[in-house]
Each structure stands twice: as structure tokens, then as C-alpha cells.
Image (cartoon, grey):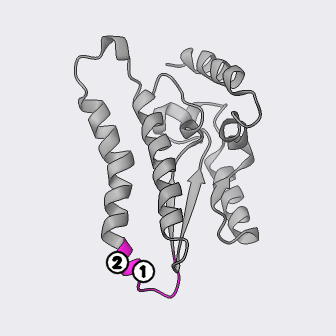
Amino acid sequence: MRPEKLREQKDVADAEAIVTTNLLGPIRLTAALLPHLQKQPRSTIINVTSGLAFLPLAVTPTYCATKAALHSYTLSLRYQLKDTTTEVVELVPPYVATDLMSGASDPRAMPLAAFITEVMNILKTQPTPPEICVENVKRLRFAAESGKFDAIFQGLNAAMADVH
């Protein structure tokens, strides 16, 4: 995840690296492991997208685009594997306090321990939900459905513009 100034961008090497890691990586891994997974009595593929797949942070356009593409890929994969023993789950994190984009020091980021605890509690109560969304990400994940997409998009991007 890297900030990109698209109006000043001279080459797309960073963008290509992000696509390779965030989109081609999971696709290649799935292709490599799926034959083995399909031989198991039960298996689960968990793809990690982001709340930014549903409402992008304008300063990181390629990152957000890859997460949106991975969301789409995950839906298609789940559909294609629906009558098999392999389940497909999408983990949709919010802004978590990690070293990604200096989130570890940002008080607006969800503490990592709290994120992990909430995810594990979801998995305990709903062993294989199609999506795992902690409370902190639901505002982004369901922005369009709530009719608040534009307001949340503008607010998020204005707030994060100060940081980057």
C-alpha cells in the first residue's frame, strides 16, 4: 500500500508491484493450492481484502483497486466452488494499527489486538461466514447500501489527506 500522486506519476512500477502482490499473488496461490484443497474432506480459502475495496482512499488508488478486484475474484471463486468441499471466506479489515501506511501510530486505526479478538469471536460464533466484517469496517463495507457512499467517501478522503 503506497500513496500515489497520479497527476505526477512518471512510471507505473509501484502500481504494477501492488497489483502483483495484492491481486496476482492470491490468484496464483489459489491456482497452485486448489487441486490439493479439493482432495481434502473440508478446506477453506480466506482472501483478505479491505474496507477500501468498497470505498476507496483516493491517495492509494491502485491498492484500493486491487482489493476491489480481489473482492470480485473471491465472489466468483466462492460461486464456482459452491458445490465442493472448499469454502471461500473474505476477511474485510478496517484501518488497523499496523506498520502499513504508518497506521501503528494513528489513533484512528483499530488496535491490532482488538481486530484479532473480534475476528476470532466472529469465527467462533459463525464458523464459516462468507464475509468477516468487524464493526469498525461496516461503515465502509456498507456505505453504498446505506445511501451514504458520497458523504463517507468525501469525509474519509478529506480526513486522510491531512496525513498523506
Residue 27 in sight: yes
Task: Specify few, some or many for label 1: CA neighbours under 10 Å numbering under 14, 14-19, or 20 or more.
Answer: some
From the viewer's perspective, is residue 69 above or below residue 116?
Answer: above
Dot 1: element: loop
Q: In the rendered picture of this protein, how many numbered marks are placed on residues? A: 2
The percent coordinates of residue 58 (x first, y second) are 50, 22
Q: Residues within 10 Å of mark 2 (few under 14, many from 20)?
A: few
At 69% across and 25% down in the image, what residue appears?
152
Residue 112 in the figure: left or right of residue 148: left
Indicate yes or no whether the magenta region holds residue 110: no
- Give the alpha-carbon distance from disc 2 to disc 1, as whole Å: 5 Å
Please identify the quarter of the rendering in which residue 17 is found. Answer: top left
* Disc 1 residue type (three-letter): Gln
Mark 2–mark 1 contact, CB under 8 Å?
yes
Residue furthest toward the top? 7
Whether residue 146 is situated above or below residue 27 in the rendered picture: above
Please give left or right for residue 73 compared with residue 162 in the image: left
The disc placed on residue 57 is none
Q: Is residue 119 above or below residue 93?
A: below
Residue 14 drawn above or below residue 86: above
Residue 38 % position (x, y): 42, 80
**Where does the image place residue 117, in percent across and percent down from the top left?**
69, 58
Magenta stretch contains residue 35: yes
Q: Which residues are magenta?
A: 34-43
Q: What residue is at 32 percent from the left and 50 percent from the top?
A: 24
Labelled disc at residue 35: 2
Q: Residue at x 67, y 36 (%)?
A: 140
Q: Nearer the viewer, residue 135 or 116?
A: 135
Is there any visible trace of residue 1 in the rendered image? no
Instruction: Indicate the amino acid at tag 2.
Output: Pro
Q: Which residue is mark 1?
A: 38
